[in-house]
Image (cartoon, grey):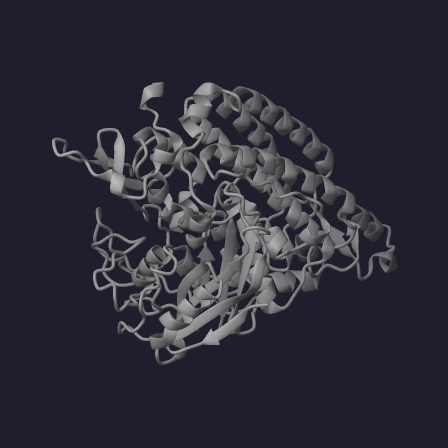
Amino acid sequence: MSKENILPRDSRFPSGEARETSDDRTALMLNMGPSHPAMHGVIRLLLELDGERIKSSEVEIGYLHRAFEKHAEAEPWNNVVPWTDRLNYVSPLINNVAYCLAVEKLAGVTVPERGQYLRVVASEVSRVTDHLTCVAASAMELGAFTVFLYLVKAREYLYQLVDDLAGARVTTSYARVGGVKADLPPGFEAKCRAAFAIVRESIRDSDKLLTKNRIFMDRVEGTGVISPEDAVAYGITGPFLRSTGVPYDVRRAHPYLVYDRLDFEIPVGSKGDNFDRYLLRLAETEQSMRIVEQCFKLMPEGRHSLGPKDMLDASEMQDLGKAGRISEIAGKTARTCQTLEGVDCKEEVYGSIEGLMNQFEGVMWTWGLKVPAGDVYVPVEGANGELGFFVVSDGGSRPYRVRCRPPCLFTMAALPRMIDGGWVADIIATFGSVNMIAGELDR
Amino acid sequence: MIETKNIEPSAALEVLKDLKDSGYNMLVDLTAVDHSSQGRVPRFEVVYRVASLDLKTGLESAPRVEVRCEVGTEPVLRSVRALWPIADWLEREVWDMFGIRFADRPDIKRLLMYEEFVGHPLRKDYPISKRQPLIGPKAEPAEPVNLNKDKPRVAYE
């Protein structure tokens, strides 16, 4: 794009009148997607073009609809957690936590404090992976392939952490109703700090490559602009809203878990353009890492989930049992391997007959967890904005209705407003900064 | 923390307009619940959730409000697109998933499902194992799995 083709900033997003085509030119309809290298996942943009200029556009979604909400009605409460992994698959831990918080609120239970800190650690690591992916992918689409490699490499270290924590890189299912799957694995904190050092270095490198780069800035500065009023009217939340200067963050506005005890800043932008969103995401990764580091300091000892009684290492318990010192292990629970999968807390399941029975009942149809009748809406700060779960129970062993409020649906609905009147090439930058995750958008 | 208002569907637009005028500038969510398997009449409950966001502080200046109205399948609700533009997509989703019509949107389009789709999947009487693919084998599965015979929450075929 040469300099002459770029319109002055103000005339770029006319209010509508300036969009008419001159008489001797005809408009061209162009289908962008559903399969298009820049349309992450599958989404279709219908564009009406006057040359390179977008006269009007329409967004068509639903290509990745997997009936999450319908499936959730047919599964026991805890079995919905793995489905939530597949919503925003770049930050699945936040989805797990959000769903479990909603069900716990309805059931009137609170997870032990250590479990809450573990959920915060999981959520924030996930938020960093999400922001890194978004910046990496949108930079790559603008031609900055090196940045993509740097950031995705850094993300890989974080995925390794998630793997250690949850047993899977992407399909984590880490949170359960009543707690989390397991405590931190040995050496997690040191590994986490090492990974954060790599993330910080990669962000510094990307920052040097992009933030003052003329090629990059020409594409992102002043494109995809939205005003704070419009953003709020469209229900846009998260980094997208904050880029317009509104410091709305669910962690601050409706504190959940232990966020009210943690010290973090909410970075905001000023112009609401793609460049602000890029800077904001980089700034937010730093805040998320700060939160995780504080959690390591503040995290109390104790149980991470509701349930288990006094715990003893399984090997120690075995030795005591062999030596016949039964009185010392009476009433204690064996602490077992962190990587065992399951619905209930595995220390309990493998350590006591009651735990085993509970587990068995928990997975039988028409048994298991029963949640009192009622409904509840719980919002959390997802990586893309306010992620809410509206959960309705009729008192049975499975949800009556689960509604997920996907943050990027609201941003996608506003996309035509941001791209209309601009250039085709700007779609790539704007769409990249939306960070559309089709799994969450289409559910 | 959340204020709930149960109102008549015909009054929904006025109530929501009053809320919007009193500073509720964000439609946080618009969704529905099908209560037909609990035998409630009318069968649907439509839930509007609004928030008033302070653009300076980023905090909410008043508690969130949930506006709930019970509706059937007949078009009694009116669209709130003029108040919050996002309602356009959310109403399309409610129509798509539940088949709830909006009085002033006679030619409303589906949002998530394709045009040729028949029925509304989040209704309780829509069988979870029903298949209607656009391409590929069209037949229903020979022996649909019923995992939940004792307490049918979802209709199986």
Which residue corresponds to the image point at 53% horizontal and 21% vertical from the top-left?
Answer: A212
Q: Is residue A81 visible?
A: yes
Task: Residue B92: give x, y in percent of width and height.
Answer: 31, 58
Number of marks? 0
Q: For residue B2, what is the image quadrant?
A: bottom right
B95 horizontally vs A210: left or right: left
A33 left or right, relative to A381? left
Which quadrant, please, contains the C terminus of chain B? bottom left
| Residue B105 rendering spot, x and y as whole percentages | 25, 63
Residue A166 vs B15, above or below: the answer is: above
Given residues B139 and B76, the one toward you in this image is B76
Could you tell me residue B150's position as x and y percent? 43, 73
Residue at 36% over, 70% down: B13
Residue placed most toward the observer, A235 or A302 = A235
Which quarter of the figure is the N terminus of chain B placed in? bottom right
Q: Is residue A182 visible?
A: no
Above or below residue A219? Residue A256 is below
Q: Residue at x 27, y 56 (%)?
A: B110
Q: Measured from the top left, where is residue A305 in percent x and y?
A: 69, 56
Toward which corner of the image does residue A426 lie, by quadrant? top left
Q: Nearer the viewer, residue B99 or A31?
A: A31
The reply, left or right, for residue B113 in relation to residue A115 is: left
Residue lying at 45% horizontally and 70% vertically, measured from the top left: B67
